[in-house]
Amino acid sequence: MHAGPLVLVALCAIPLLLWARSAPLDSRFTGSFMSLTSVAVLLAFAGTSAFALNLVLGARLRGVEALFGGLDRMYKAHRVNGQVAFALLLGHVVFMLAGRATISGDSALDLLGPGAGWTVFAGVIAFGAMTVSILLTLFVRLGHEVFVYVQRTFGFIFLVAAYHAFTTDGAKADSQALKLYMAALATLGAVAFAYRSLFANVLVRRHRYRVKAVNRLDEFVTEIVMEPVKKPLAFAPGQFLFVNFRSLALSETFRPFELSMERQVFSVRAGEVSNQFHPFSITSAPGERTLRITVKAVGDYTRALRRLEAGADAIVEGPYGSFTHDVPQPGQVWIAGGIGVTPFLSMARSLGDAGRPSVDFYYCVEHRDEAHFLDEFRAIAADRPDFRVVVVPRDEAGFLTAERIAEESGDLSSRAVLICGPPAMIENLRSQLTAAGMPAEQIHAEEFGFAKLGRRGPGPDVAQNDTGSRVGPASQPRRRWSDAQVLALMAALVFGGVMFAAGVGVGDRLASPERDGSTAGVVTTGAPSGATTTGEPGSPAAGKAVFASAGCGDCHALGSAGSNGGVGPSLDEAKPDAASVVEVVTRGEGSMPSFEGELTEQQIRDVATFVSTSADR
């Protein structure tokens, strides 16, 4: 178990703890309005934190990759964390609107328009843009370059969302630690976005290569050999890289614009060749000066690479990945599925003449003639008696099973199993091996599942990898939930939470003293304006917390609270006394809704004391 996911959860939970310590909780969960608003604030802090951290995950930083145990695991966490961030921010919007709706429907709708002020409307714009970008990612079949540009919009969306978060009056005004923490996290996310998306050509370390040869192994598979212009890339066997080819042939292949109803694809090709990087396994040995990758044509970009010409420039970034034969077990079983043979090529070429590990290599292909590099593997086996090659053609022998591996390779309890290929093959073999008693920590797999791949059949690559595997229900051994289903479930849970909270609020109102005839501790109609029958004098400190959590600053300007709302009158200019504040907050006046039943008598006295003593006089 790697620490990455736990670190993500902890970093998102810290602002919630700081918020909880910044003011008494009983003042924040009294009545439906306060309770719903407080939940909305909590969701905002957690969602903004998750959003910022997703920008960090998307920056492909080596230290972060190590924390998750590989780039593939990091990108899986990136995908899940992005869904969580959206669900949390969706919850923030829904709970905030639900809280305002307990006052009046018009008060809730006012939050969605520009009349609420630029601070609030910036949040509306950010969430709307985030929703559109996610829908495009999930439901529109985009070309790779468009997909990348849509992903980059999240950085700009985050900047607008951060502006909303830091200019909206809230609990962060009562906690310097919370304010500093959120500022640090937002800055980290913005810097990561700038590093990867805005200034990558300047800041990201890359190596320049030149294409030496393009070897077409069959009608689908191509080996590309590159030589370094200056210092070669240092890597470990089994790792992969991102490469961008600057090729005249590719530029002529891709049209600047394509809109096809037949293929259901929208693509703007302007940056396809010059800007975009694609992941491929390294097949050369670390000691070689030349750098080799092997590509299977399964989409537009990988098919176009068959036209790549010798002499084209290649910009290489990497290496990445932790899939390697450098594991504690001296006895190993390697299992390759189709073009998933590529990382094993690098491992086999680096073995040398003798020494550990002892390897049984199972090469699984659809047909025997698709076993590329088989002669080279057999030549290595001829020089090393502890390296055994077994070809498994599916049309002749069926699928490889854990039972067959155990029969031919013997006891697996002391061995390591390394698998690279389609996700379905990996998961089937993993489940079979663990069911047979093999420890899960001795099974190592590489599927490059972080890449978003195109659908089956003709169409664009959307970050095509070299395994040729497909991520999605069609390629899985069992049915999985789609992204749309996950988001629908999240939305349903949020809606259920709102309905539950609203129901609790209605119950609070029905059980309130006004409903059962009791008048103890309540402002009475017979009392003078602002007078109460019972209660202690108001507390300015507690009143400041109520002023922030009740959203008073969204409508009113008050320098002591750091608010600049322009919907209602400026309290610094009006300079109301405590009695007037109690009267207006309790009964309402003009467009000002009544907070009677939403705030307790003591909370109204607290906010009245704070406003009357804090207004600029």
Image: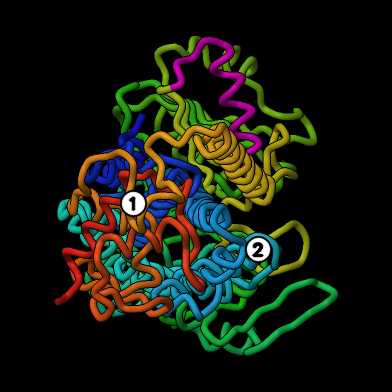
Q: Is residue 205 visible?
A: no
Front position in the image: 374 or 471: 471
For the point 40% across and 76% down, the residue is 568
State the quadrant of the C terminus.
bottom left
Q: Which span of residues is magenta-colored?
A: 423-440
Looking at marks 1 and 2 on the same chain, the residue that comes earlier in the sequence is marked by: 2
Q: Residue 464 at x, y = what percent?
A: 57, 61
Q: Residue 271 at x, y = what percent?
A: 52, 83
Instruction: Name the image quarter holding residue 554.
Output: bottom left
Examine the structure image and report whether residue 467 is included in the region drawn in magenta: no
User: Within 10 angstroms of label 2, few (less than 14), some, or many (20 or more) residues?
Assistant: some
Q: Which amino acid type corresponds to the residue marked 1 in the rendered image?
A: Ile
Placement of 478 over or under 283, stated as above or below = above
Front position in the image: 95 or 180: 95
- Mark 1 highlights which residue? 604
State the quadrant of the N terminus.
top left
For the point 46% across and 50% down, the residue is 525
- Mark 2 highlights which residue? 297
Front position in the image: 357 or 558: 558
Mark in front: 1 vs 2: 1
